[in-house]
Structures are given as structure tokens and as C-alpha cells.
Amino acid sequence: MTRNIVIAGAGVSGLTLAERLTSTGEDVSVTVIEKESCPGGLARTFGRDGFLFDIGPHRFHTSDTDVNNYLLEILGDDHVTINRSSNVYMAGKYRSWPLTLKSVAGLPFPVLFRSFLDLFRKQSEVEHPTFADYVISKYGKNIYNYFFRGYTEKFTGCSADTLHIDWAEAGVNRAVIDKNVKADDLVSLLKSVLIPKPVSTSFYYPSYGGIQTFCDKQAQRIQNSGGRILYNCEALGIETANGKVSGVRTADSGVIPADHVYWSAPVSILFPDAGFQFMDTLLCNIALSKPQNNNYQWCYFGQEDILFSRLTVPRNFRADTVPQKADSLIVEITLNDPEHRNNPAVLNDRLIHQLESVDALQASDIIFMDWKLVSHTYPLYDLDYRERLSDLVLPEGLQLTGRCGSFWYNNMDHSIGEALAISTGQTFAKDFWK
């Protein structure tokens, strides 16, 4: 008998799973439902007047052979390989990230001296460590107060001592990216700065379009193999019978029958009373009439008085993401004020002033500022989120997956790796959930 499989969410995780399930030749009927009008989820690309804007700095990097092979299978020849160039803005200057001796040497002497003293201070152990406890124990109070605390509290909208330790374990790994770069405590960070190993991190990126090109290719393969994708179809929950999943309830298409449901949409939809919280992000996609002086692909901004937490420069991923002799910026702002949800343009003047103050652009070069609200961008790890996850009771035939579905702070390569494992009946170990 044909098994009816429904996948909620056409992000990278849901699409990878659907593409693998439809490619096996087995007698399965696969339906993907997606609330947006296109595939990609958090890996969508917005286009306007010849400018392409991803949702932040999306790119593919992995040390997993299976994931790497899958990326090349989907992209084929339609990809370019680029070297990483990322920065952090500290003490009024752009500095390479991960930090190098040259970038650290330019920090104020008191910062360097206090960090040196932290090497010899033993931190007291805490029974239930928070994000703040973890970072202080690894990097010392000075670096915590100088960078991590301000950046994290601005980014999440939460006090650092109310965040679970997993936010630190995941966040540092996600920011460093390359496993060859060791920065998991102050000693290894200093070693990487003072005795750097030659590391050149490279990425795959589509050779046309934006990052969504990868997802478009997946979607086409799914449909070519007999699967279907329903766009503008919002998943509202699941239907069950005798303790087993029987379908997915949608806003406009009624109930879609299912023998098995893979849920990569936000888990908070299924369990609205469980207290799972997600962050939302405001993007300001800015088109510029001529090149600016931004030589990074993306840059972190930890200063509490600066609106944005990260800037991305699309042309440094691929030159033709902007028209000839033009430039652009993707500005990411965590949505903490409800007023800005419906009227983000009220931030225009303040944002332009701050972007000029960090030499990211000249106001006279702006062609347009296009605001986008992207919901459920990151799961928010409060102190008891693990207990709430473990208390969930899932009906037979329901499996949570992906960043939003399994409430997992991951990157695209992790989502692909998890989906590949699930499609063959294997388990996938989440890196910081040990």
C-alpha cells in the first residue's frame, strides 16, 4: 500500500527529506506544505530591481562527506567556491573573525591586560550554569562583558543569565563555523591568535540567483519524482486517531491525510502551551548606487547602542547579486519592539545614521530600503527548555525535524545531515545535545 507522507515546512530540512524520500522509487506519496509562496524557509532570496538579498549570510560549509556529496549532487555545476571573509566590529574598528593577532593587537590595552589576568583566575563551578556562567568560565569576565554579554542580550532580547548554557555551546560553534579553528575557551582562543594555523574556510554558493537556488533545485526534483509541494498552505496542527497521526490540518486546504508526518514548521504550532519561544528578525535590504568600502561577507556588531547585530554584503558572495557598479547591504535587527513589526520604516533615519557612523555606507548612495519581517528565525533557549522538550508526548507517526520543528539552533548543513539520516532510518546526533 502507498504510504502517505506529509512534510510541514519547505525549508532546507523539509525539502532535503522530501527529495530523498521521493528519489527512492518506493511506493510513497510525499506532500510538502509551505505557508510561503516559494520554497526555502529561512534560506529564501528576495529580489528587487536586479538586486538579490538572502536572509542573512547563507552559504554551504560542511565537514560531513555525505552532506558535501549531497550538496554537489543538487547544485551540480551550478555553484561557485568562495573563501570566507568575516569581521567583528570592536573598539571602533573592523577586525577579522575569528580573531587574529593583528586584529587583537589593536584592541585597547586595558582590554588585553584584563583578559590576560583572566587566564589565571579560577572560576567557581555552578551547579546549573547559564549562558553567562559558561562564557565567563571559558573566556573570563572581561571578554564576556566586553563582547559576549552585549551582543547576546541585544540579539536575543533576553538577559544573559536567563539563557541556557546550550545557547553558548551552539552560538560559539555557529559563529566560528570551521571545526579546524579552535576558540572554545580563552586558552584555545589565545593560541589561535598567537600561533595561528593556516586555515582558509571555503563555501559553496549557487552560481546564479541567491541561496534559494539550491532550494528551487530541490523542489524541482521533488516534483519531477512525483511529489507535490503546496505553497501558500499554512500548517495549523495535526489530526490523530487512536494515538496515531492521521493527517495535517491546514488553513486553506482542510486536512491532508497522512500515515507519517515530518514536522519542520515551528514546534510551537503543535504545542502552543509548552512555552517554546522563537526570535523574529527584521531585515532591511538596502540597494546602493555604487560600491562601498565593506570588504567582509558578514560582520557582527556587539555594541548595545547599535540597532543591528549583523551586516551582510551580497556582492562579496558573488558579484552579480547586484547590478554593475552597484552595491547592497543586508541589515539584521532582532525584533524586540512590537511597534516595529508593522512599521519598521520608523527606524530609517536612526539606521542610516548608525550605518554611516560605522562607515558601512553613504546615505547619498541609497537607492531603496526594503524591509522584510522574517519570523521564527532562531529558537530561544531559556533555562528549562530541555525539560519541556523531553516532556513532549508525540503520537505515533509524528517526527520533529529541522531548526524550527526540533527547536534546534543549527546551520543548513546540520539540517541536511539530519534529513539525510532520517530518510534512511538512522538517528542524527545533534552536536551540543549530549
Image (cartoon, rainbow, N blue to C red):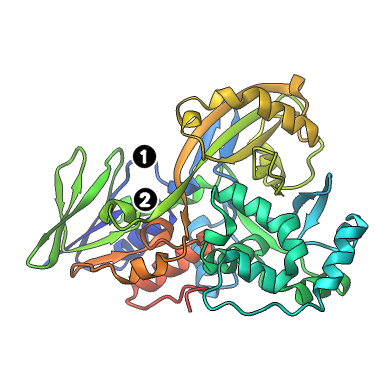
Quadrant in the picture for the N terminus: bottom left
Between 372 and 64, the one lying in front of the other is 372
Say whether marks 2 and 1 touch (CB < 8 Å): yes
Q: Which picture quadrant has residue 225?
A: bottom left
User: Which residue is disc 1 drawn over?
Assistant: 36
Is residue 75 in sight in this rendering?
yes
Left/right placement of residue 17 relative to residue 81 reads: left
Q: Of helix, strand and loop, which one carries label 2? A: loop
The crowd level at tag 2 (other Cα within 10 Å; few <14, some 14-19, many 20+) is many
Q: Which picture quadrant has residue 188?
A: bottom right
Report, in whole angstroms, how far the alpha carbon at label 2 lies from the one at label 1: 9 Å
Residue 220, above or below 179: above
User: What amino acid is at disc 2?
Assistant: Ala
User: Which residue is disc 2 drawn over?
Assistant: 10
Left/right placement of residue 69 relative to residue 298 reads: left
Point out residue 348 in the picture as x, y percentages from the top left corner: 63, 24
Q: Of helix, strand and loop, which one carries label 1? A: loop
Point out residue 250 in the picture as x, y percentages from the top left corner: 21, 44
Left/right placement of residue 363 relative to residue 66 reads: right
Q: Earlier in the sequence, mark 2 or mark 1?
A: 2
Q: Residue at x 34, y 53 (%)?
A: 265
